[in-house]
Amino acid sequence: MPSTDTTSIEMDSTAIPTTAIIGGGFSGTLAAVNLVRFAKKSQRVVIVNSGRPFGRGTAYGTTRNEHLLNVAARNMSAFPDHPSHFFEWLRSRCEYDAMDDTTLRETFIPRRIYGDYIRSLAAHYLGDADPRSKVRCEVIEDCATDIKPRQGEKGGVVILENGDPIEAESIILATGNQPPAGLPGANKLANDRRYCGNPWMNWHENLPSEDQHIVILGTGLTAVDVIVTLRHKGWCGKVTAISRNGMLPQRHFRGIEWPHAVPDDGQTRSLKELVRLIRQDCERLRGVSQNPAISVDKLRSRTQQLWKAFTHEERQQFLRKYAADWNVIRHRIAGPIHDAVTDALDCGQLTIRPATIESLASGENGIEIHLVGRDGEKKMIEGDVVINCTGPKSRFSDSSLSLYRNLFDRGLAKPDSMDMGIAVTDDFEVLDRSDHVSSFLHAIGPILKGTLWESVAVPELRQQAYHVAKSILNQEPAKIAKKDTIEYSI
Ligand SMILES: Cc1cc2nc3c(=O)[nH]c(=O)nc-3n(C[C@H](O)[C@H](O)[C@H](O)COP(=O)(O)OP(=O)(O)OC[C@H]3O[C@@H](n4cnc5c(N)ncnc54)[C@H](O)[C@@H]3O)c2cc1C
């Protein structure tokens, strides 16, 4: 593993360029790995990570075997220039020996094994094993709370929670999603053992008895993780999952060869026009008994381009009218996961409740959840255990993270126009308060969602990690042919 001891770096760290990477999940780790892969001169890379396990981050830090990837193995390579890398790495594991290549490529692997993959890349590229490496890496387990510009020199100084500074010529923000937004009343439940505000904690180690009621706030991918773990542990009590739209993620299926709903003719299209084309395409697909989700899948390689061409009003309209449907179609789940959720519904263990959560309060018999139903009627239900799976906070301008509050106060960065992340150029350089391009600050990962919309999953993030490393090294990214095949359609 990379050294966590700053004194072990033998190179004169003041004489060689340093890149500081804030966040050691998939995005930050792969940015570091690509710096190592392509550096032709001596470099120093410092990764600052806290909160989630280094290399694994939020998604791949799970220790539960039943939590599967929601992308098939064939499309989970960490390297855009080596698309079968993950598949080849899987071949190093004995548990897949009996699987033929076609089956393995289509398999949804446990996320913790994907975490092992990223950690193995970190060990290989960021460790000290190869004496020829031009890059020395270190991982510091601490939280970055601020960045100040350097006086009279290019670059910035990352300030850690313990007060230590890290001077760097380039800094990459790879902080992932924000923590979940607090629900009204939740702060009073901070010390209530019946409330779990962070679904990534080990809530499953202390399950209530089966005559008790678990309430899940949210019906997205994290809620699905909770349901699947309860089933896996054989817990048979009642579960209610609540969300505004009451929609669960759809199931993956094998796509078919199908023309694009939106012709790739370089023309800009309004949201209205796109909706019309996609609806027509969905009708055509239904007409031949095919899943209309294929229409959304086929847009994947152009989603960012289409989003960027929308006006601000169109983006807002998309979020208001179409995003909920888009999310359940686009972020689908593996077959075995979908089966477990369907079984829970069919046997009456799981109830989905479409409602808006107004507030939470500590009650005598459980946590009270105050709701407004679709009919506008106010209701209250109680949960013996309540788990918040409402997903990350999306607004950035009032971020609870001191790093972003300080960056915005200093004017070194600004929220993007949708207030869903931070504003960047097409080359992932951060834009400051006055729209000037930063000479040293870059950003990748889910914090680009407002700018790109499609910026959360490995197929996009590996491109960003590769591109930003090349750009810091002043190298042209190689042209990687995008295969628009059925493979990329799911
Ligand atoms: C439950 C779940 C399942 C998913 N499954 C898939 C999947 O199957 N396939 C897929 O392609 N994508 C999946 N995703 C999408 C996932 O977001 C990306 O694949 C990827 O893991 C994002 O990595 P990241 O490094 O950008 O963010 P993160 O994984 O969130 O890592 C960011 C890291 O930075 C740390 N950090 C943040 N701020 C600071 C700071 N100020 N100082 C120091 N450290 C800081 C965080 O604590 C964290 O460790 C899933 C996401 C989730 C949440």
Image (cartoon, rainbow, N blue to C red):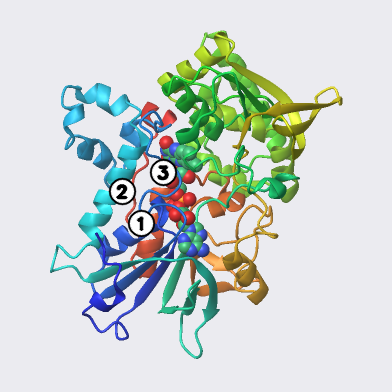
Amino acid beneath label 1: Thr
Instruction: Please name the residue shown 25% across and 70% down the image.
Output: 135
Mark 3 or 2: in front is 2
Residue farthest to the front, as pictured: 364
**What residue sits right under mark 1 in the picture?**
29
- Dot 3 or dot 1: first in sequence order is 1
The amino acid pointed to by label 2 is Ile
- Foreground pick, 307 / 114: 114
Q: Position of residue 116 (x, y in %)?
A: 29, 44
Q: Which residue corresponds to mark 3?
A: 458
Q: Secondary structure at mark 2?
A: helix
Q: CA distance from mark 3 to mark 2?
A: 12 Å
Ranked by sequence position, the earlier of labels 3 and 2 is 2
Q: Residues within 10 Å of mark 1 (few under 14, many from 20)?
A: many
Q: Amino acid at mark 3?
A: Val
Q: Mark 3 vs ligand 1: CB under 8 Å?
A: yes
**Residues packed near mark 3 inside 10 Å, few (<14), some (14 to 19) or many (20 plus):** many
Q: Is mark 1 within 8 Å of ligand 1?
A: yes
Label pair 1/2, CB-CB below 8 angstroms: yes
Q: Position of residue 65 (x, y in %)?
A: 35, 31
- Secondary element at tag 3: helix
